[in-house]
Amino acid sequence: MPNIPFFSHHPDVEIDPVCKMEVSVEDPPGGKHRHEGTTYYFCGVGCRNVFAENPAKYLDPNFEGEPM
């Protein structure tokens, strides 16, 4: 039997840095935003807009996400 990790990251899914929801990279509902050479994907326009205003807040490793 193969050793399959309990949690695995799907290659077509990224985490919205604002609300921490999984988002499809092929068709993100909130669009994309490029910051310092990295593309971020969003569940909704609201998350994308607040991220664009203050990326450092949402990229802080201690940020746990906020409901949108």
Image: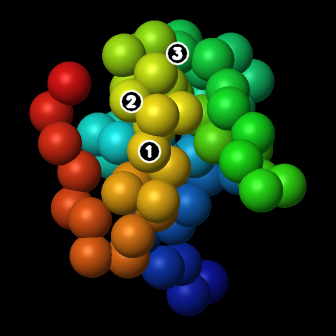
State if disc 1 and disc 2 touch (CB < 8 Å): yes
Q: CA distance from mark 1 to mark 3?
A: 17 Å
| Mark toward the start of the polypeptide (1 vs 3) | 3
* Other residues around mark 2 within 10 Å, as few (<14) / some (14–19) / many (≥20): some
Mark number, residue 54: 1
**Which tag is nearer the camera, tag 1 or tag 3?**
1
* Residue type, mark 2 in image: Val
Q: In x, y percent, where is residue 2? A: 61, 83
Mark number, residue 6: none
Determine which residue is flagged by label 2: 50
> Where is 10 relative to 52, above or below?
below
> Where is 37 relative to 27, above or below?
below
Left-right relation of 2 to 48 = right
Residue 34 placement: quadrant? top right
* Residue type, mark 1 in image: Asn
* Residue type, mark 3 in image: Gly
Kind of element beneath mark 1 = loop
Q: In x, y percent, where is residue 14? A: 57, 46
| Mark toward the start of the polypeptide (3 vs 2) | 3
Mark number, residue 30: 3
Tell me what residue is drawn at x 67 percent, y 26 percent. Answer: 32
Left-right relation of 67 to 31 = left
